[in-house]
Image: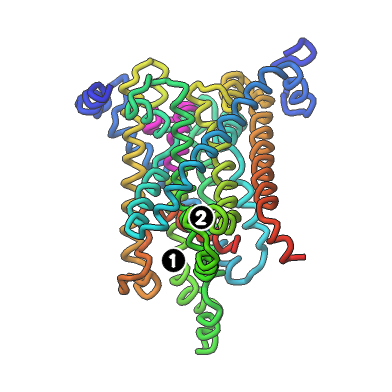
């Protein structure tokens, strides 16, 4: 089976599109496209909102609502929204599938970014914030020059977990007849072409790992060294690819103890 | 559906959900039961495996970073990809009934190893030293002192794992496994011409209720295992 998968992946005809089939490259581009659109919209919504809620301490119920939305089954919400929205776009383009998918992806990506941004601003040490005000900084200055850089590690881990969520869910979106790498999984399943299905799984996993690695690199070079403590070796090390669970358990430990 | 409710009519009134449920009670309950089973068993197995692994990561400092990188890596892989990748890696059939429970166990394990290790790390040094001074052997220290103190942290991790599992199981429904995800599949197929909501909405409601119920059960268990926390608060 592993040999078949290898053969499927190394067959050049599977990589380029033909008149009948979309190749790996084009599906990969489509997948990245869905992901980037969803992440850009989510970032525009969640980042300012999270900063504002964290800075002013107002409307914290939004955070609770966003967190509660995570209990919803992704697949169910995806199918429901597709069924509701798709008929309004029927017959013209594949917008009828693209728009509901993007809405679901945004719904999924907003909560982790929002709650981590909020938590990041909240967790800035009060003494640091007080010192900034004491130096005569105005509210916006404190927000953008003290609170934002200090909360970057948490914002990044929220963004990384949002990215992984979006990549994973964009795969499932192939199930509602949208393109993307998920196509190979669902087509392979439907045609009982298991090498194709498994190759699809491999490609999606590789995309997720590479995306997370890239974001980890960006994080490494944008977060101030004074915050990560990377200059001191004996610290618990920088946040590796495990930031998603790291933040989670830090929250759990602080909640429970 | 009975003749009372034509398929083409607007299917969003509560009556339709109820009628759908009544018409398909045994099927829906069967899916719910399978879903519950798939959400709980992997977490239990993962917890049993995570306890010694978490202890190792805590006991031997050098084991912590690689173990956390590995579990983080696992958590990075999308669920649908893990589902289809488990069989070839383990040499199972491409559509084996075991692949979903195994993938879910791996996910829960990735989360719980870290939770157990961090929970044990949160046990105050003085407490462990006092227990040793009182004559606890390493094994007794672990099971009767460290583990009980770590229960709230581990329970919080369990709650996250169980709630996440309920959602991830529905993904397995899209590749043909029997659980509440099948209701979404059915609803999608019935909606080809006009939207037909009952199975989809019923599936979402049952998933959320199941997640809340399992979450509450873990919380309850954690409360019962840590009576001293209530004593402090009172």
The magenta region covers A166-183
Q: Main secondary structure of the magenta part?
A: helix
**Image spot of residue B48 (x, y percent):** 50, 41
* Quadrant in the picture for residue A159: bottom left
Let me know if residue B132 is in the magenta part. Answer: no
Asked if the residue at tag 1 contacts the one at tag 2, i.e. Cβ–Cβ closer than 8 Å, the answer is no
3D distance between C-alphas at marks 2 and 1: 37 Å
Quarter of the image with the N terminus of chain A in it:
top left
Tag 1, which chain? A
Residue B84 as seen in the image, left or right of residue B184: left
Q: Which mark is residue A226?
A: none
Residue of label 2 = B142
Query: Measuring 51% from the left and 78% from the top, which residue is drawn there?
Result: A142
* As drawn, B125 above or below A198: below
Quarter of the image with the C terminus of chain A in it:
bottom right
Total marks shown come to 2
The structure's colour scheme is rainbow
């Amino acid at each position: 089976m592993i040999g078949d998968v290898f053969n499927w992946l190394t067959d050049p005809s599977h990589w380029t599109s033909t008149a009948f089939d979309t190749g790996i490259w084009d599906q990969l581009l489509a997948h990245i496209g869905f992901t980037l659109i969803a992440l850009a919209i989510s970032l525009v919504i969640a980042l300012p909102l999270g900063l504002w809620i964290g800075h002013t301490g107002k409307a914290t119920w939004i955070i609770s609502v966003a967190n509660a939305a995570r209990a919803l089954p992704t697949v169910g919400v995806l199918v429901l929204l597709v069924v509701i929205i798709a008929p309004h776009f029927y017959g013209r383009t594949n917008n009828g599938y693209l728009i509901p998918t993007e809405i679901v992806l945004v719904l999924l990506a907003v909560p982790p970014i929002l709650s981590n941004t909020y938590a990041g601003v909240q967790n800035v040490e009060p003494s640091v914030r007080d010192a900034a005000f004491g130096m005569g900084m105005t509210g916006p200055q404190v927000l953008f020059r003290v609170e934002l850089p200090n909360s970057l590690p948490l914002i990044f881990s929220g963004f990384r977990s949002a990215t992984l969520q979006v990549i994973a869910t964009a795969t499932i979106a192939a199930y509602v007849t949208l393109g993307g790498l998920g196509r190979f999984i669902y087509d392979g399943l439907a045609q009982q072409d298991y090498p194709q299905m498994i190759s699809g799984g491999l490609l999606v996993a590789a995309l997720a790992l590479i995306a997370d690695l890239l974001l980890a690199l960006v994080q490494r070079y944008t977060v101030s060294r004074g915050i990560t403590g990377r200059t001191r070796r004996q610290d618990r090390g920088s946040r590796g690819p495990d930031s998603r669970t790291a933040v989670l358990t830090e929250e759990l430990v602080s909640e429970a103890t | 559906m009975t003749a009372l409710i034509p398929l083409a009519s607007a299917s969003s009134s509560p009556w339709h959900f109820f009628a759908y449920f009544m018409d398909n009670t045994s099927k829906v309950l069967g899916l719910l039961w399978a879903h519950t089973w798939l959400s709980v068993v992997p977490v239990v197995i993962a917890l049993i495996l995570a306890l010694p692994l978490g202890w190792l990561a805590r006991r031997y400092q050098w084991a912590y970073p690689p173990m956390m990188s590995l579990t983080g890596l696992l958590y990075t892989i999308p669920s649908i990809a893990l589902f289809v990748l488990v069989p070839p890696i383990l040499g199972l059939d491409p559509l084996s009934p075991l692949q979903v429970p195994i993938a879910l166990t791996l996910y829960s394990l990735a989360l719980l190893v870290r939770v157990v290790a961090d929970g044990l790390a949160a046990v105050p040094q003085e407490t462990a030293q006092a227990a040793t001074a009182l004559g606890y052997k390493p094994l007794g220290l672990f099971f009767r002192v460290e583990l009980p103190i770590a229960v709230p942290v581990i329970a919080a991790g369990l709650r996250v794992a169980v709630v996440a599992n309920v959602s991830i199981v529905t993904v397995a429904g899209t590749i043909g496994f029997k659980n509440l995800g099948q209701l979404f599949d059915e609803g999608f197929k019935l909606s080809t011409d006009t939207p037909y909501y009952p199975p989809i909405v019923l599936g979402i409601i049952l998933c959320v209720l199941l997640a809340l119920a399992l979450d509450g059960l873990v919380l309850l268990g954690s409360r019962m295992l840590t009576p001293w926390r209530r004593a402090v608060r009172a």
